[in-house]
Amino acid sequence: MADLDLDAEAVARAVGVFDNLRLPDVAGQPLMRDACGDWFRSLVGAAFGSADAVTGERAVGEIFCLVPKKNSKTTNSAALGLTAMLLNKTPGAEMLIIGPTKEIADTCFRQAKGMIDADPEDAETGRAYLRDRFHVADHEKKITCRVTGATLKIKAFDMRVVTGSIPVLCIIDELHVLGSNAHAQRVLGQIRGGMITRPDSLLLFITTQSDEPPRGVFRSELTYARRVRDGDVKDGNLLPVLYELPEAVQIDPEKPWRDPKYWPLVLPNLGRSITIDRLMRLYRKALEKGPDEELRWASQHLNLQLGMGKHAEGWIAADFWPAAGEDYTLEEFLDRCEVVTAGIDGGGLDDLLGLGLIGREVETKRWLHWGRAWCSELVLERRKDIAPLLKDFEAEGDLVILTDPTQDLREVAGLLAQVSARGLFPAAHAIGLDPYGVAALVDELAAQGLEGDLLVAVGQGSRLTPAIHGAERKLQDGTLRHARQGIMAWAMGNAKIEQRGSAVTVTKAAAGRAKIDPVIGLLNAFTLMSRNPEAEGDSASPWDDPAFSLAAQ
């Protein structure tokens, strides 16, 4: 956690209130002082110790906390909500804790209510302070302070959850579950819009990593929090508290995160709600169930980000893909290459059209990849579970959502015309196409002057075996690099290998939602680059160069 300039007295008061709440669902109902780790106590101090003593405005207005399962996130959220109620002096203040599902919201409410019920009676008066102070309405999942009239509502996520509300505190539990909710970004915008009128407001996200590639509102909020943590974005109002292993450890094909020596780095409540021994028992069970379950376990208990949807029959090239990434644009890609081949794969209206470019770098002779995809609005309508993810890719510039039916054909042809104008295509076999359903695209390419020997049909299915094995080897030895595009990482993870005799073929890991068209585009381009082509601009004889002829004489 970053060093903060906090009001020591306010921190001590907030932590003192928090520490004296009791854990309701553990034998003996211990105080939070003993049950909770210092990591969350520091977060409580940051939440309530950054407010200006005069204006009430918080220097820390948002906190994004990423922490693995079994580190008492939901219980701590309930305790923080009650702490806010006890510290609050604003009459009628509204506070919210939002769970992504009814089950999670109900768990949080039970914990908050349990803490109130667990408050011991005074030996002299026979009365319990918290039960006197708060009225609990079970049917509304609402806690009301009898002193200030403030309310703490604990609700499941819903479009109407913040209608007309201007909360002074909003805690969003398990944000990762909302990643596939198409309305989550809009609701979050409403929450922030209401809070902007209250300088004393606090928005807290506390979540585990997703057990699939991050998407939607979770992906955008996590990415922003990382950029603030890393200093790429200056936002003093947001405090990122991210318990995750370094990226190099996460993407290493050798999977060093399997070593338990790394685990304590991301388990701040270790020794309390979780132990290494208990984690090891869970891990051994996950191993017995196969690679899919092992990765799911790691995402939940180590916050390992599944940058691609790996699965038991996944393409081994996907393991090497993350480490092969570089940051370059299309223009930079073209500048670095001496020759380029293109591969195109497209299906029906419910599919993506994928374009892959493979270029041979001028000096190193390494192969570089750059890709793009297109889809119609129909894909978003019929595949609502991946719609938020596709919109993320659109925002990154790697996917185009069509505004008219032929936009993809025109833009693909335009991009390839750009490559051709640079003299980077070979004279023949430059553009590899799936031989089925390409008539309209061929016509569009011809309109750009891309026809004849430039176009070639690339056999699909098991005929891509050499490209599949070749890509695996070149990714492993570092001679195939790519532009670190999110849509490609996702598509690589969706690829499933099937053995057919001595050959292999790439298919989708899951019907419908798992798109691999950008991967097939890559393999088509790879097939053509495997022929070791020379760019048409380099194919002329040196004797045709007047300077060379003069020197020879």
Image: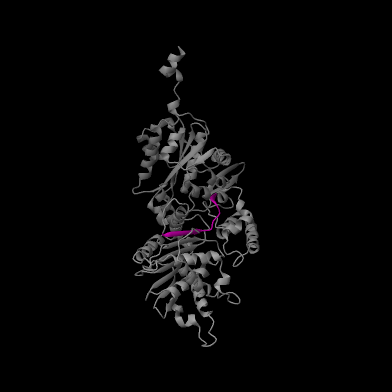
Queried whether the magenta region covers residue 238, the answer comes back as yes
Queried whether the magenta region covers residue 538, the answer comes back as no
Position of 185 compared to 532: left or right? left
Residue 100, x across and y down, in percent: 46, 66
Identified at 52% across, 31% down, the residue is 532
Within the image, what quadrant is residue 431 found in? top left
Whether residue 101 is visible: no
Q: Nearer the viewer, residue 218 or 243?
A: 243
- Compared with 423, 461 (above or below) is below
Position of 282 compared to 21: left or right? right
- Compared with 419, 262 (above or below) is below
Q: Residue furthest top?
A: 553
Q: Nearer the viewer, residue 436 or 249?
A: 249
Q: Nearer the viewer, residue 20 or 332?
A: 20
Q: Magenta span covers which residues?
A: 237-247
Whether residue 292 is visible: yes
- Compared with 55, 124 (above or below) is below
